[in-house]
Image: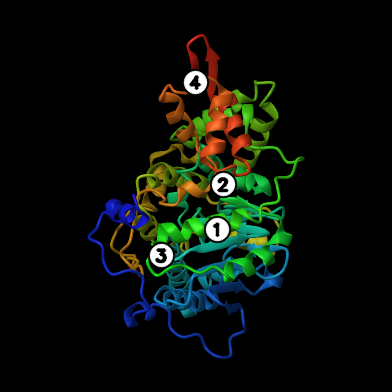
Amino acid sequence: MPLRAKLLSQQQQQPQSRTMASASSLAHFPPTPADEPEDVVFQSLYGLRTIELNRPKKLNALNGSMIRKIAPRLLEWAKSDMANVIVMKGAGDKAFCAGGDVQQLAKWNQDPAINGRKKSAAYFGQEYKLDHLIATYQKPYIAFMDGITMGGGVGLSIHAPFRIATERTVFAMPETTIGFFPDVGASFFLPRMEGQVGTWLALTSEQLTGANVFYSGVATHYLHSTSLNALESRLAELRFRDYDDLDRRLEVVNATIEEFVTGLPYDEPIAVAGEVRKAIDRCFRFDTVGEIMEALEGEMKNPVTNKWASKTRETMHMRSPTSVHVTLKQMRIGGKWNIASAFKREFGMASKFMGYPDFNEGVTARLVEKRKPKWRPASLEEFASEDRRQLVDSFFLEDGKTKKLELLNDETYSEYPFKNFGVPTEKEVEDKIAEGKVKSKGEVVEYFVREKRQKQGVKEVVSEILSRKTQEGEEGLTWVYEE
């Protein structure tokens, strides 16, 4: 089914006009004052349009000025026949984008003279509008996740059809470390990751690095950073026919990226694999933090996973207790939200967090004063009472007090329409085995390597899935379902 048809079939509302730079949409992003610094650099080369986040000393942290420049430019390019491919990247060699400028938000929140909390909420509103625009963009959009990619940087990349990791990529959603929750559409993408990996990443703020960003499915491709400039030049040369639909254009871009693949690092195996991956799925499948902590305690008796379990329990106790409890509920209900609902609901949550003490304390303690935060409530265990459970629920209530987020278009979907560009998923492998046409692990690997046109990483990822989730017997290959 063509991509456009997929999007339309999944929409829960009547489709409206496509992303266009109309007067009403641009009104969401007022012109940036001319005296603001050049924090975003736009370049055009033939059919390529490049957006470079240009705050390298700040690890390209995203601020309101940058958002107000990027969104209108994307809207402009959406209706231009001259713009074929969009590349989003960061300046310098350390970061793509290390997140939003949360220190500025914390300062605003503590300044009642300027109604700072309202100003912070407005920032999140603009950020989520941009992220949703990227998620529903109708031109090939490629994110170079070269370097630190966290928080706001994830919002600029994770919803794109093409996400390129390099040896320098460091991916994380670190919000629970600063008294916030994983946002920028994390309600949508984290619950849809394999097994309970998304929940584990969300609650612990753990990092994935290098090739493991690719193995996990966060990135669709892995290239060495030295190949990116050459790839940009090649992308600029691409020409599409007038009658090529988006699916065809995406296929051409995908084949072009694959031309620059130079291999995976031999000394960097899949990290979230084997017994640790099984333990993640066992421990983080529960709906309460108490059950997760109890499961981790039980896992400490396992000689293979006890070090991982002990470290994870310690990590959980360091995070904001409120953030951890709110985030777990977010992971459980966010999987039922469509992409538009995810941003709208997150806006309400973010607005409420701006008035909650843990965010200001977490940002000030972690990023400014470099000390241990003093969370309120102070421990995960304090949320066993009814009033604490109501506190968690309050972050999800649509009470009418918070202004609702108006997105730049009405497009939505319930599943990512671009999943075929990454490595195979567990569901794909399970479905193939269920057909009964493959009798051995080797046959399954060969099938997916062939189906994915020799894409790098397919053999490694499928082999890991098979070793963990299948067994071979007299009746052939069967899928193992754990209790």
Image depth: mark 1 or mark 3 in front: 3
Of 45 and 344, nearer the camera is 45
Q: Earlier in the sequence, mark 4 or mark 3?
A: 3
- Residue drawn at x 59%, y 63% as measured from the top left: 99
Q: Residue furthest top?
A: 474
The amino acid beneath tag 4 is: Val
Residue position for label 2: 378
Q: Are the residues flagged by discs 4 and 2 in contact, CB closer than 8 Å?
A: no
Q: Are the residues flagged by discs 2 and 3 in contact, CB closer than 8 Å?
A: no
- Position of residue 384 relative to residue 64, above or below, is above
Image depth: mark 2 or mark 3 in front: 3
Label 1 residue SS: helix
Q: Earlier in the sequence, mark 1 or mark 2?
A: 1
**Of the numbered discs in the image, which one, if any, rests on residue 154?**
1
- Relative to residue 45, is residue 57 drawn left or right? right
- Residue drawn at x 50%, y 53% as measured from the top left: 181
- Relative to residue 273, is residue 287 drawn left or right? left
Image depth: mark 1 or mark 4 in front: 4
Residue position for label 4: 480
Q: Earlier in the sequence, mark 1 or mark 4?
A: 1
Residue 386 placement (x, y as % from top left)? 38, 40
Mark 1, other Cα within 10 Å: few <14 / some 14–19 / many ≥20: many
**Of the numbered discs in the image, which one, if any, rests on residue 138?**
3
Q: CA distance from mark 1 to mark 4?
A: 33 Å
Image depth: mark 1 or mark 2 in front: 1
- Position of residue 27 relative to residue 242, above or below, is below
Mark 2, other Cα within 10 Å: few <14 / some 14–19 / many ≥20: some
**Of the numbered discs in the image, which one, if any, rests on residue 203?**
none
Quarter of the figure with residue 403: bottom left
The amino acid beneath tag 2 is: Ala
Q: CA distance from mark 1 to mark 3?
A: 19 Å
Of 411 and 297, nearer the camera is 411
